[in-house]
Image (cartoon, rainbow, N blue to C red):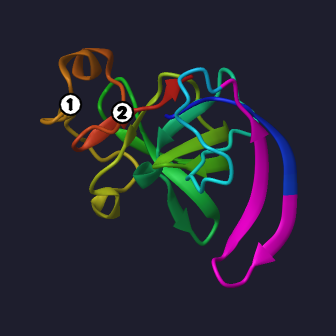
Amino acid sequence: PLATGKLTLVNNQVDTTTGTILLEATFANRQERLWPNEFVAVQLTEFVRKSAVTVPSVAVMTGPDGQYVYAIGADRKVKRVAVTVAANQDGTTVISKGLAAGQEVVTNGQYRLDDGSLVSIQQPTNAAPEQASAGAGAAASLGPAAGQ
């Protein structure tokens, strides 16, 4: 990021020629990387959910009874678990009900599964070593439900 600052004004009138809205923010700008009236892409964090249970978004399926994931038991058998999704962002889904932190879920091949199906866990092939050992991020076939 160029800088971190504080949002001070939101003008919710959309400029129809550019599809943008005007945001004004205050930055220390000690390195003089930002200039007045410059257009920049921003990422606005409204709030941070602490201790949220998250899964890769590809793990969440939608069926006639709502959203669900296939949770992996200690015996490597899966069980369809109804979940309540609180939010989605950048390929990560926050689960507010249905899963516990650390519970593993299926991220690939869910359409071939039923309750009681036996699965094998594959480690991601392109993850950094610290990710593979910690089980962070989306695995090639299966990934953990992580508390963040």
Query: Relative to 127, does residue 117 appear above or below in the rendering?
Result: below
Q: For residue 14: magenta?
A: yes
| Residue 9 showing in the rendered view | yes
Left or right of 111? Residue 24 is: right
Left or right of 30? Residue 27 is: right
Dot 1 and dot 2 residues touching (CB under 8 Å): yes
Tag on residue 53? none
- The region drawn magenta spans 11-28
Q: Quadrant of residue 4?
A: top right
Q: Is 62 or 15 nearer to us in this picture?
A: 15
How far separated are the C-alphas under marks 1 and 2?
Answer: 8 Å
Q: Residue at x 33, y 64 (%)?
A: 111
Question: Where residue 56 sits in the image (x, y, percent)?
Answer: 43, 44
Q: For residue 22: magenta?
A: yes
Which of marks 2 and 1 precedes in the sequence?
Answer: 1
Q: Amino acid at mark 2?
A: Gly
Q: Residue at x 58, y 39 (%)?
A: 34
Question: Where residue 64 sits in the image (x, y, percent)?
Answer: 60, 72
Callout 2: SS: loop
Please identify the residue farthest to the left as the structure is shown: 125
Query: Relative to 32, does residue 58 appear above or below in the rendering?
Result: below
Q: Residue at x 36, y 26 (%)?
A: 136
Left or right of 123? Residue 78 is: right
Q: Which residue is mark 1?
A: 127
Q: Residues within 10 Å of mark 2 (few under 14, many from 20)?
A: many
Q: Is 48 or 107 nearer to us in this picture?
A: 48
Q: Quadrant of residue 110?
A: bottom left
Callout 1: SS: loop
Q: Which residue is mark 2?
A: 137
Question: Where residue 144 sits in the image (x, y, percent)?
Answer: 40, 30
